[in-house]
Image (spheres, rainbow, N blue to C red):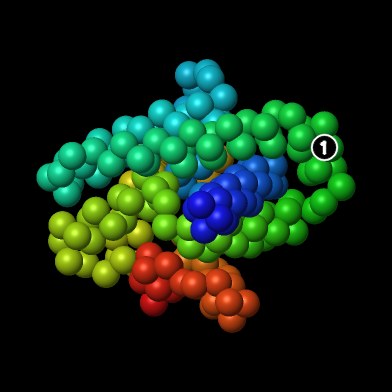
Amino acid sequence: MNHFFHRCLIYFTGLFVLSLGVVLMIKSNVGIAPWDALNVALSQRIGLTIGSWVFLVGGVLIFVNSFIKRSTPNLGGFIPILIIGSFVDLLNLKILHFMKIHVYVPPWILFFGGLSVLALGIAIYLRASFPSVPNDELMLAITARTGWKINVTNTIGEAAAFILALLLKGPIGIGSVIVVLCLGLLVGVFDQLLHKMGMTRSAYSKELSQ
């Protein structure tokens, strides 16, 4: 039971840190990760909160992943998107909204801080070996289906989200390109640091850092 509680703590901590990174980059206004840009674009065009779209888009991806893998949907994937969606709305609409953090921190410092926090959150939550975020599962699904390397399938997934966000006039910018190019590398760096601190690496993070 203590081991399970420890894994839950790691999982929730990682997802919270991940969500904080997302919100910091949103507030930087210099471009954000393609999937997050898609969620922001849908929120601006249709309504509902960004966190709600994290859940809805993630839900669609769960069934897309199932189709690609030709298997039953991984319903456990609803757990992380529900948690992340809640954290994103809490941070974006409540905590950081009242702080007006963009007034005090230069945009690019805020962006790179958010990108680093996002990468750290991913490296942490994967260690719990609980259900992963559906867009991460998308990479694994395409890899399992095609045999291509994880960095190639990651680019395919990010490119699809990039195009959709661009069509919907989401907050795509130079920062979005930086995320696509650097996020995997940063996850690998934090993965190594956490490993040196005594935290076991996940199989997924080993692949992502290659």
Q: Position of residue 32 (x, y in %)?
A: 56, 48
Q: Which of the pair 128/33 is nearer the observer?
A: 128
Quarter placement of the C terminus: bottom left
Residue at image coords 28%, 57% = 140
Give the side of residue 205 with respect to residue 12, left or right.
Answer: left
Give the side of residue 114 with respect to residue 167, left or right.
Answer: right
Q: Position of residue 115 (x, y in %)?
A: 61, 58
The image quadrant that residue 207 belongs to is: bottom left
Q: Which of the pair 178/7 is nearer the observer?
A: 7
Residue at image coords 55%, 51% = 5
The image quadrant that residue 134 belongs to is: top left
Q: Residue furthest bottom?
A: 196
Observer able to see residue 176: no
Give the side of residue 53 with respect to residue 77, left or right.
Answer: right
Q: Position of residue 136 (x, y in %)?
A: 38, 53
Q: Is residue 164 above or below residue 31?
A: above
Residue at image coords 17%, 66% = 147
Q: Which of the pair 70/146 is nearer the observer?
A: 70
Q: Is residue 22 above or below residue 123?
A: above
Q: SS at mark 1? A: loop
Name the residue tied to disc 1: 100
Q: Neighbour class for label 1 at 10 Å: few (<14), some, many (≥20)?
A: few
The amino acid sitting under disc 1 is Lys
Observer able to see residue 20: yes
Q: Residue furthest top?
A: 47
Q: Is residue 102 above or below residue 186?
A: above
Give the side of residue 51 with respect to residue 102, left or right.
Answer: left
Q: Residue furthest front?
A: 1
Residue at image coords 80%, 53% = 106
